[in-house]
Image (cartoon, rainbow, N blue to C red):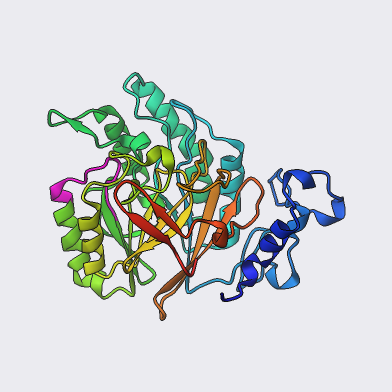
Amino acid sequence: MKFNRRYFLISLSSALGLTFNSCKNFQQTKTTNVEKFNSQIPANQTISPSEISTPSTPAPPGMFAPKRGDIRLVVISDLNSSYGSTNYQPQVEKTIPLIPKWQPDLVLCAGDMIAGQKQSLTEENIQAMWNGFDRYIATPLRQTKQPFAITIGNHDASGYIKSEKFIFAKERRLAQNYWSQHQKDLNLKFFDAKGFPFYYSFLHKEIFYLIWDASTFQIPTQQLEWTEKSLASSQAQTAKMRIVIGHLPFYAVAPTKNKMGDVLAKADELTTMLEKYNVHLYISGHHHAYFPAYKGNLKLLYSGALGSGPRTLIGSNLSPRNTLTVVDINLEQNKSFYTTYDMNTLAVVDPEKLPEKITGLNCSVLREKEA
């Protein structure tokens, strides 16, 4: 197995039987305070001189600093709390100001920014949630002029249809109103924004991004036709890389989401289409469990939940955790590498401790070898 210094300290601490809880009272000299973050880095997460933030390895003070790729993404997902909540859990509020410290080229949110999908919520309730999102999430990113892209989740504006009508039409209308007002604030060069914010595409630093409406298990035929046309376009095919983002994943990785309705229908057909057009990576949320996977030639990044309700992985006894993932991309080699942080402990998640294979109801996925 190739040695990876990124995870050496974590593996060593595991071998010594150290845990974050046992280190709560460690000496002050072995702690590193992160700006505006009340959590402490465990003593076993001491940062070596080669891992401290530098211009080529930017990161928040005191946190592991991975080497920056040609392009850097920060991926967050599932930020919300209980139905109707207008505020966010502490780890969410404290994470957002840290994001610029990684110096990302783009921040991606894989959905569930607010806590809707409940018909009893009034327009006032829904608008208050978007106001809360704007206050705690969007405004801090906007103030740094950070390029920011989102995909709509089921709790933002579910696309579920019954009797040819949107069940949550009110939520979709208010989501569209909010994002239409702030489309220019995202600092993106749109290629096709006719379906924004539900589906759209843009070019950013030589990468073509396509966002589709995976807020339900079934992507409409018209939108799939648009997807194929977009990916086949000269703009997409002459880009150095293609990335697709949607809320629901193709295959299950969390036990409580291992059922139809929580994964995309016709998943194999969809992944085949993405592979046909040389899509490098599909980023999803919804399952609230981080897992760096691949199937065939398509990489699958299951972003964990930064907000409430993180989940375990199928076949794993690892505790749930709130995560953020930094994706560093090497364009010439057509490779991407992940550094994922537990945002409660600030420790790096060691992918070697994740299952090598996860088998859900509709397929098995393998753990990414180069995560």
Instruction: Kindly tell me whether residue 211 is visible in this rendering.
Output: yes
155 vs 202: above or below: above
Q: Position of residue 248 (x, y in %)?
A: 33, 46
Residue in front for this viewpoint, 266 or 118 = 266
Q: Quadrant of residue 220?
A: top left
Q: Taking 47 as reference, is 169 left or right?
A: left
Where residue 332 appears, as percent x and y from the top left, is 41, 81
Q: Is residue 97 left or right of residue 198?
A: right
Task: Give the residue at x 57% y 35%.
Answer: 89
- Could you tell me which quadrant the N terminus lies in? bottom right
**Residue at (13% x, 28% y) in the render:** 163
Task: Please identify the residue farthest to the bottom as the structure is shown.
Answer: 332
Query: Which span is picked out in magenta?
Result: 211-223
Q: Relative to 177, does residue 316 appear above or below in the rendering?
A: below
Residue 364 lies, in percent from the top left, at 35, 55
Q: How many numbered markers are drawn? A: 0
